[in-house]
Image (tube, rainbow, N blue to C red):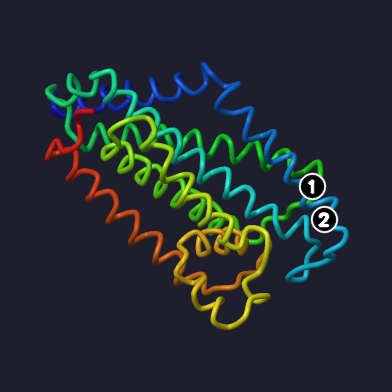
Amino acid sequence: MSSEFQYNLVALNTIVYREVRRFMRIWPQTLLPPAITMVLYFVIFGNLIGRQIGGMGGFSYMEYIVPGLIMMSVITNSYGNVVSSFFGSKFQRSIEELMVSPVSPHTILIGYAIGGMLRGLMVGIIVTLLSLFFTHLQVHHLGITLLVVLLTATIFSLLGFVNAVYARNFDDISIIPTFVLTPLTYLGGVFYSITLLPPIWQTISLANPVLHMVNAFRYGILGVSDIKISTAITFMLVATVVLYFFCARLLVSGRGMRT
């Protein structure tokens, strides 16, 4: 094992440990709010409104929306962790010290991405456990379920990194989640099946990447989906690779590393 590899491994462990310690230290702000928000979704949409709606896709409305709500929590927390953490490092100028060190840009990127993934997955697990108080979940395909949630957490961790690189102030890190991420999530089939839409809107909805992630995860849990699972997984694999190399390119070039 070369000394360079050992050095980068120590650096990776340090970055991941710092990221995990960061969101665990302030868990009332990072882990508790999404849990409370999802409980409200379960009560209001799944329980109260769900009684009026009845079934959807062969399942009760509560069962149908739970996979989408789990994915919503994974998406927002994976994204939010990386964008806030990396931009904070830019704002404090600590990222400049890391950039001039012998640490590989890939190590830096992977460290921040893993931190975002861990927070997203941890919140996803919390939401899943809370959902068991409201409905019964039986995993239809464990392999697809794990693959989809890991790819989704990775993709949005990398997207959070891109946002943090281009952000110039704290307002910039809230624009994308508010005006892009939230609409895509709510229109991504979390609360409904796109088969309820007119044909033209069904076609337009297929351009929403969140729709593919939500439906692929719903297939893993319930065994039903509005889209082809192979298409969704292929899209997520390609998006992960493209985003990773794009983020690595940004780090190597040093673009946007100063606020």
Could you tell me which residue is drawn at 49 percent across and 72 percent down?
A: 206
From the top left corner, tell me how far across and down residue 183 is, in percent: 53, 55
Please, what secondary structure does the residue beneath circle 2 have? helix
Q: Residue 49 carries which label?
A: 2
User: How many residues crowd around disc 2 within 10 Å: few (fewer than 14), some, or many (20 or more)?
Assistant: some
Q: Which residue is identified by label 1?
A: 44
The alpha-carbon separation of the residues under discs 2 and 1 comes to: 6 Å
Could you tell me which residue is drawn at 29 percent across and 27 percent down?
A: 12
Which quadrant of the figure contains the C terminus? Answer: top left
Measured along the vertical axis of the image, is residue 256 above or below residue 42? above
Please, what secondary structure does the residue beneath circle 1 have? helix
202 displayed left or right of 112: right
134 displayed left or right of 182: right
User: Could you say which is closer to the camera, residue 6 or residue 200?
Assistant: 200
Residue that protrudes farthest toward the right in the picture = 51
Could you tell me which residue is drawn at 13 percent across and 28 percent down?
A: 2
From the top left corner, tell me how far across and down residue 166 is, in percent: 26, 40
